[in-house]
Image (tube, rainbow, N blue to C red):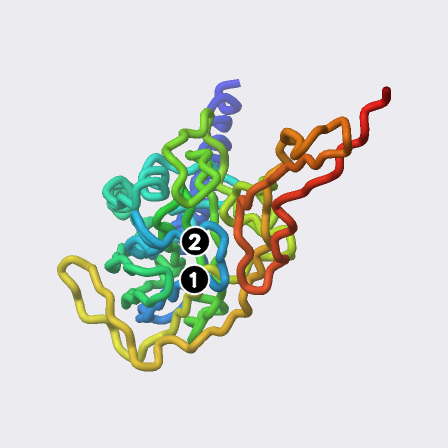
């Protein structure tokens, strides 16, 4: 009995040793990959070029011309691993993302990224100056490491309720190698925190907040929406991102604020004009008769233009209509 009681702790001790070794091996694997497998040797430098295509030719409906005119906010770029998300389609916006999407402020997002950097889930943050028009370029050099091979970015549309364009977790490291070049189009997203329909809508908080969703030519399905183009199957690109690897590491910047463009950093984009059909109101009620109604006088009604046509869209129909009133029966 005594020897049996002594053997039991020994078996338990061996079992605990095995479990401990297994746990440590799993922890080492997780720690080595940081949730993102990248076995590339050393860091990689990239130039990130943002090009806005927001013009009255491609987006004629309610295009902002003044107070303020169409423009882009600062470009904010974050390098990170899978343990961090700047934003995510289908998920609610963070307080920092809400502040950025509604007001273009980056203070809270920078605080969140700094906290994530302490946990080693964020590598670096970069910002550029804004673009004062709907068409233009903005760029910055970024440094990615095997520990933080993902790139996320956001730019706000100004003016807009809470609309932005962005990239969520672009992986620039695949198969143990850094990608050389990536180009893709950007489309608008709604942060789900403001219910405004148009670019210049007054502040109208969404209660409760909704998830981040992509804006399409038919969603939201409401004629008042500034991006509602029912004749289009999809919206033209609102902007383009071009990411190209550099042969040298970026020069260290104190404020990480840049806005330089390489001579061959962007290629001209040509988009067909988006047709905008005329929209008119409902007919008014029939007016008074011109002449005695009893003897077949004329009466008329009117309607007015809600949205003028543009870019070869359907012209406006007649805005006035008249008819002869039927003679009254004796």
In the depicted view, which residue is nearer to us: 240 or 168? 240
| Residue highlighted by disc 2 | 63
Residue 187 x/y as whole percent: 49, 56
The answer to whether residue 5 shows anywhere in this view is: yes
Q: Which sits in the foreground, 41 or 202?
A: 202
Vertical comparison of 56 with 196: above or below: below
Q: CA distance from mark 1 to mark 2?
A: 8 Å
Q: Secondary structure at mark 2?
A: loop
- Can you say which quadrant of the picture contains the C terminus? top right
Q: Quadrant of residue 169?
A: bottom left
Q: Is residue 80 visible?
A: no
Taking the image as shown, residue 311 lies to the left or right of residue 129, namely: right
In this picture, is 252 found above or below 281?
below
Q: Which residue is mark 1?
A: 55
Residue 84 is situated, as x and y percent measured from the top left of the image, at: 38, 46
Instruction: Tell me which residue sits at (27%, 57%) in the image.
Output: 130
Mark 2: few/some/many CA within 10 Å (<14, 14-19, 20+): many
In this view, the residue farthest toward the left is: 254
Residue at 44%, 41% (x, y): give it.
191
**In the depicted view, which residue is nearer to us: 265 or 232?**
232
Residue 320 x, y percent position in the rendering: 63, 44
**How many numbered marks are there?**
2
Foreground residue among 195 and 178: 195
Q: Is residue 190 left or right of residue 101?
A: right
Contact (Cβ within 8 Å) of mark 1 with mark 2: yes
Residue 129 image label: none
Answer left or right for 294 relative to 236.
right
> Disc 1 or 2, which lies upstream in sequence?
1
Which of the 4 image quarters holds residue 95?
A: top left
Q: Identify the residue at image location x=36%, y=63%.
A: 146
**Vertical comparison of 211 with 32: above or below:** above
SS for callout 1: loop
């Amino acid at each position: 009995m005594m020897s049996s009681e002594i053997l039991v702790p020994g078996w338990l001790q061996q079992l605990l040793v095995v479990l401990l070794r297994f746990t440590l091996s799993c922890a080492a694997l997780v720690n080595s990959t940081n949730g993102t497998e990248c076995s590339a040797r050393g860091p990689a430098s990239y130039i990130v070029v943002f090009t806005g295509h927001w013009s009255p030719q491609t987006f004629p409906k309610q295009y902002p011309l003044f107070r303020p005119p169409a423009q882009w906010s600062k470009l904010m770029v974050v390098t990170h691993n899978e343990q961090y998300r700047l934003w995510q389609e289908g998920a609610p916006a963070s307080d920092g993302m809400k502040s950025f999407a509604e007001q273009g402020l980056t203070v809270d997002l920078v605080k969140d990224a700094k906290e994530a950097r302490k946990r080693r889930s964020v590598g670096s943050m970069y910002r550029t100056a804004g673009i004062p028009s709907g068409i233009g370029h903005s760029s910055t050099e970024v440094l990615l490491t095997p520990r933080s091979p993902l790139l996320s970015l956001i730019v706000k549309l100004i003016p807009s309720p809470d609309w932005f364009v962005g990239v969520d977790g672009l992986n620039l490291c695949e198969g143990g190698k850094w990608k050389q070049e990536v180009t893709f189009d950007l489309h608008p997203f709604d942060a789900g925190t403001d219910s405004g329909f148009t670019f210049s809508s007054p502040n109208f908080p969404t209660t409760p907040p909704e998830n981040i969703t992509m804006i399409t030519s038919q969603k939201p399905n409401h004629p008042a929406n500034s991006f509602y183009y029912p004749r289009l199957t999809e919206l033209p690109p609102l902007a383009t991102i071009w990411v190209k690897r550099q042969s040298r590491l970026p020069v260290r910047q104190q404020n990480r604020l840049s806005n330089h463009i390489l001579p061959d950093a962007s290629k001209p984009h040509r988009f067909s004009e988006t047709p905008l059909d005329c929209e008119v109101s409902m007919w008014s009620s029939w007016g008074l008769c011109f002449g005695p109604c009893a003897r077949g006088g004329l009466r008329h009604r009117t309607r007015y233009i809600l949205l003028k046509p543009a870019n070869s869209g359907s012209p406006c129909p007649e805005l006035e209509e008249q008819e002869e009133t039927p003679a009254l029966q004796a």
